[in-house]
Image (spheres, rainbow, N blue to C red):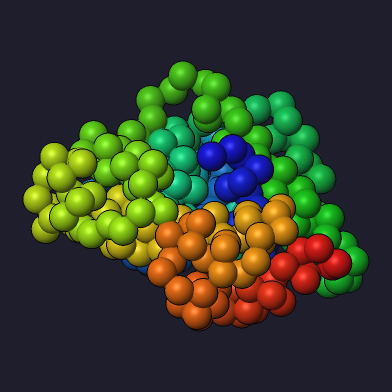
Amino acid sequence: MSESDLLKHLSGFSGGVIVYEPHSTLGPRWQKHVQLVYVSEGSMRIQVDEHIRTVGPGEITLLLPGHRETFRMDPDSRTRHGWATAEILDLSPTDLALLESLPAKMVLTRGMRELLRLLEPLFTVTDPDMHMQRDAFSLALLAQYVCAGRQSGLPSRPLPVPLQQACAFVEAHFTQALTVSDIARAGGVSAAHLIRLYQKHLHLTPMASVWIRRLEEGEQLLRNTGLTISEVAYACGFQTADHFSRRMKSRTGKSPREFRQQAWLG
């Protein structure tokens, strides 16, 4: 999974900058998006589930969907911070695993600082044409975080080994008939424990991850091959073309034929 594969599943960027008085709080809230939060002055303590992060001036942190967050601002001084939020189009288990593996926070790089200098004035503009620039800079900021995080050597948040093994098994066998028991056996845990791991770390079920991976493969085959719809369906693990079509319609809002036509003709 590359950074570009991940970033294409994010859209609807928004953000802003705000100054909080000492002792201000935010939350608790349930994070639904992918969000970068950075501090220019002061500091903040963020409780993410049971873990505490302290973010100081010149630092940036990554917040991910499916977690409970509470913010407490610097008790001694005002805190100026900004954020850039991306709505999720269709974040796959592999996408989420990549994000979860990144450092929870890091020092702003020179490239990030330059992007923020360009990005901050765009948060308040109402001109729709300027929104394209805002989205592009926001996406670039997240890309910088992903690249810097993967290269930094900072402590990361690896998935539990049984979940890594289960995900690798799904990736290798998603075109075959699979059950939760098959996936759990590959991870060396019970089916019930596997379901808990998937829900805690990836926020979906094991079988949902299989269907998502099959549909991702189906989209790639529709875009890049001349296989018939039935051939695509069978190649990515569906038993019938009708089932594939229903799943595609639910995922994309388009039938496989409509999806291919848009991909080929725009």
Q: Does residue 1 appear to the left or right of 196 in the view shown?
A: right
In this rendered view, identify the residue nearer to me: 137 or 221. 221
Answer above or below: position of 146 versus 213: above
Q: Residue furthest top?
A: 153
* Residue 216 percent location from the top left of the image: 54, 57
Q: Please tell me whether residue 241 is drawn above or below residue 77 in the rendered image.
A: below
Q: Residue at x 21, y 41 (%)?
A: 186
Q: Which of the two residues, 151 or 236, is positioned nearer the viewer here?
A: 236
In the image, residue 252 lies at what x, y percent? 60, 73
Instruction: Left or right? Give the position of 85 relative to 31.
Output: right
**Which of 54 and 151 lies nearest the eye of the viewer?**
151
Q: In this view, does 5 lie to the left or right of 150?
A: right
Number of marks in picture: 0
Residue 237 as seen in the image, left or right of residue 10:
left
Question: Image point 31% across, 58% down: which residue?
Answer: 177
Residue 97 vertical position relative to residue 158 in the rendered view, above or below: below
Residue in the image at 71% along x and 76% along y = 258
Displayed quadrant of residue 102 = top left
Q: Where is residue 138 in the image (x, y as percent from the top left)?
A: 70, 50
Residue 58 shows up from this direction: no
- The image quadrant where one finds the N terminus is top right
The percent coordinates of residue 3 (x first, y second) are 61, 39
Residue lying at 77% horizontally and 35% vertically, measured from the top left: 114
On the rendered image, what quadrant is the C terminus found in?
bottom right
* Residue 115 can be seen in this image: yes
Pick whichever, 82 or 138, lies toward us: 138
